[in-house]
Image (cartoon, helix red, strand yellow):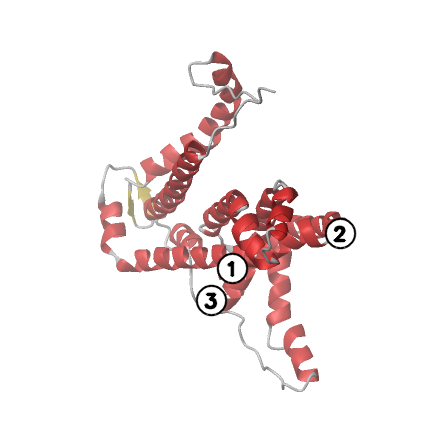
Amino acid sequence: MRITAKTWRDPTLWLATLPLAAIMAVFFLIPLAMTALLSFQGTEYYRLVWTWSTDTWIDVFSHWHYWSILIRTLTMALICVALCIFISLPVAYAMVHRMPALSNHVTILIVFAFLTDAVLKTFGWVLFLDRTGVLNGALDVLGFGANSTDILFSSSATMLGMVYNLLPYTIFCIYLSMARIDRDLMLAAYDAGASRFRTFWEVTLPLARPGIFAGGILVFVLALGVFLEPKVMGGGTSPMAAELIRQTFETRVNWPLGAALTLVVITIGTATLAIAGAVAVRAMRAAPEPQEDTQ
């Protein structure tokens, strides 16, 4: 098999990417430029004043409060990525190797939960975790007493909602990666005397690394902008970046500051994608090239 690498000198490649480039320019680059322009304006008596000033950015970099919320957002996003991958690995492995006959049914259930409105799912968790909700009622029947759990309106409840809403991304990415693994490699490991755990650790897991990597990056970028979970399930006790930006725009009516904080979050997400892309390109270059079969 011969692989032909295309470069940007090829006009067909330019024509193929032109529609996507136009969409990105209209719906992303132009609004991003307007947001950057807005961050250099000022406010006076809760009104926007069109002046060229760096006071907003000085305010962002001189107040620890903003950065503490951004650090909390990054920490919650990383924990969410770790939990999603930890849960998705056995689910994807079971769908591929342990219950392939039921994998389509499980996929439909996951897609159905994924397509359900996030507001309904989030408020459903509130009803389930409330002091007088289903969870405490069931524990009371089992003899643990009323109000035996009280995790609602806390960081734990926020993390629960984030993992629940973002879990399908890692499940599908890892599932697709595991489904492409040649089963003969696993059978060869079994024939060599490897146990199921060692085969998974030394064969399946390394080959499923692209799906794990893609799912983790996707969940991390999406977790940076979560809004419902910290607001509804967390009760606003531990606000994250999206809630801070909303309060800045709506409550404080400070649009330049909200635009600056938005750019900071976008920069973090863009840097994450850039690093992930560089790592992926480096891995592709380090991988051995397929050889053409001469027979």
For marks 1 and 2, give the CA distance: 24 Å
The residue carrying mark 2 is 102
Inspect the image, locate mark 1, and give the three-letter code of the amino acid beneath it: Leu
Residue 134 x/y as whole percent: 67, 73
Instruction: Classify mark 3: helix, strand or loop.
Output: helix
Inspect the image, locate mark 2, and give the three-letter code of the amino acid beneath it: Leu
Q: Residue furthest right?
A: 101
Residue 96 x/y as whole percent: 67, 49
Label ID, residue 107: none
Of the 4 image quadrants, the one containing the C terminus is: top right
**Residue at horizontal 59 percent and vertical 50 percent from the top:** 189
Residue 97 left/right relative to 251: right
Inspect the image, locate mark 3, and give the three-letter code of the amino acid beneath it: Ser
Label ID, residue 83: 1
Residue 269 left/right relative to 124: left
Label ID, residue 155: 3
